[in-house]
Amino acid sequence: MKEQKIQELKNKSIEELQKLLGENYEKLRKLRFNLASNKLKNVREISETKKTIARILTFIHYEK
């Protein structure tokens, strides 16, 4: 994740982060489903999405 995207996460409110977290969980679910059905071309996208989820959770945790 680029530094610019990390800065964007820092500037978001908790509500926006929670919405983004839900979207990323849904994206991860779809990626895993596509992987199981051999439709996924870029497998690295799964690990990138997991890292994004971890970053969002970190920001939510420190905001409380």
Image (spheres, helix red, strand yellow):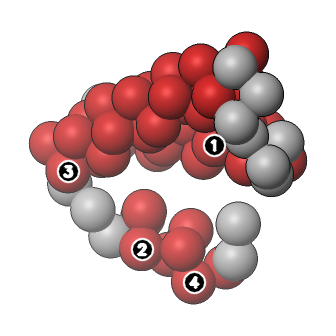
Measured as percent of width and height from the top left, residue 15 is found at 15, 42
Q: Residues within 10 Å of mark 2 (few under 14, many from 20)?
A: few
Q: How far apart are the two marked residues, 2 and 1, measured between alpha carbons?
A: 16 Å
Disc 2, disc 4: CB below 8 Å?
yes
Q: Residue at image x 47%, y 37%?
A: 27
Position above or below: 13 against 1: above
Q: Give whichever of discs 3 and 4 has the lower sequence position.
A: 4
Q: Is residue 7 visible?
A: yes
* Marking on residue 4: 4
- In the rendered image, which residue does mark 3 sit on? 16
- In the rendered image, which residue does mark 1 sit on? 49
Q: How far apart are the two marked residues, 2 and 4, measured between alpha carbons?
A: 6 Å
Measured as percent of width and height from the top left, residue 34 is found at 63, 28
Point out the residue furthest to the bottom here: 4
Q: How far apart are the two marked residues, 3 and 1, measured between alpha carbons?
A: 17 Å
Q: State left or right for residue 15 relative to residue 17.
A: left
Viewer-side residue, 38 vs 8: 38
Viewer-side residue, 34 vs 15: 34
Q: How far apart are the two marked residues, 3 and 4, measured between alpha carbons?
A: 17 Å
Measured as percent of width and height from the top left, residue 45 is found at 73, 48
Q: State left or right for residue 57 relative to residue 18.
A: right
**Closer to viewer: mark 4 or mark 1:** 1
* Marking on residue 8: 2
Point out the residue furthest to the front here: 38
Local secondary structure at mark 4:
helix
